[in-house]
Image: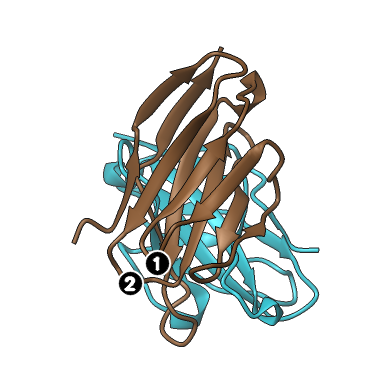
Amino acid sequence: AQRVTQPEKLLSVFKGAPVELKCNYSYSGSPELFWYVQYSRQRLQLLLRHISRESIKGFTADLNKGETSFHLKKPFAQEEDSAMYYCALRGVNTGFQKLVFGTGTRLLVSP
Amino acid sequence: NAGVTQTPKFQVLKTGQSMTLQCAQDMNHNSMYWYRQDPGMGLRLIYYSASEGTTDKGEVPNGYNVSRLNKREFSLRLESAAPSQTSVYFCASGGARAVSYEQYFGPGTRLTVT
């Protein structure tokens, strides 16, 4: 079964502090992992995906297959990073782009 | 391009009433999805449609029906609303497998069942 776990419901940091949003997954095959973000009063949107190995808005995430994790990191948080973040998984073997989402972590960056 | 649009934005129903949530996309995507978002539960897939003419159940399909009217439109129907269906509903669409697995979301419909 596919499962995504985000252990923190809320992460509160000060501006300029490092941020790490945790994501662990359970999947027996090769997963494809994503981070989606929902800013206040905006729709959910893709932030980054592991296969792209990209940095978006200063955020990075590395897939660690040994620890089955895909944590989202940013060295210096900004107030505009405050949002709801969802980790999502697509099982490559499913042959279809059905995503399983975690329960989400709300990031609050205070000045 | 409007992307993914949903109507209505808000709705209040009484228990037992029925309604249809509408979703349309103008990105020529094959796949479309309906999710519900509840506090502490994240997004859960209700139904999806891999292509025009096909629909399949997701994680929480009970109490819902869907129709893939054409490639653009995917509607979600509540035949007899229950308070447990109070939620925010999101429609999404996705690109072809060879191109991208990104899903594009609509703005959501906030439904309250009293």
Q: Quadrant of residue B96?
A: bottom left
Q: Which residue is mark 2?
A: B28
Q: Which mark is residue B114?
A: none
**Residue drawn 64% across and 22% down?**
B82
Q: Is A108 situated above or below B103?
A: above
Q: How is the image coloured?
A: by chain
**Residue drawn 62% across and 70% down?**
A90
Q: SS for tag 1?
A: loop
Q: SS for tag 2?
A: loop
Residue A47: x %, y % from top left: 39, 62
Q: Is A12 situated above or below B44?
A: above
Hue used for the chain lettered A: cyan
Do the numbered discs 2 and 1 sit on residues whose CB atoms are within 8 Å? Answer: yes
Chain ID at mark 2: B
**Which one is nearer the viewer's eye here, A38 or B72?**
B72
Q: Amino acid at mark 2?
A: Asn
Q: Which mark is residue B71?
A: 1
Q: Quadrant of the N terminus of chain B?
A: bottom left
Q: Which chain is brown?
A: B
**Which one is nearer the viewer's eye here, A77 or A48?**
A48
The answer to whether any part of residue A17 appears in the image is: no
**Residue drawn 74% across and 70% down?**
A67
Residue B55: x %, y % from top left: 60, 61
The answer to whether any part of residue B9 appears in the image is: yes
Question: Number of labelled discs?
Answer: 2
**Which one is nearer the viewer's eye here, B79 or A95?**
B79
Q: Quadrant of residue B58?
A: bottom right
- N-terminal of the pair, mark 2 or mark 1, is 2
Q: Is A100 displayed left or right of B35 in the figure?
A: right
Q: Is B51 displayed left or right of B42 in the figure?
A: left
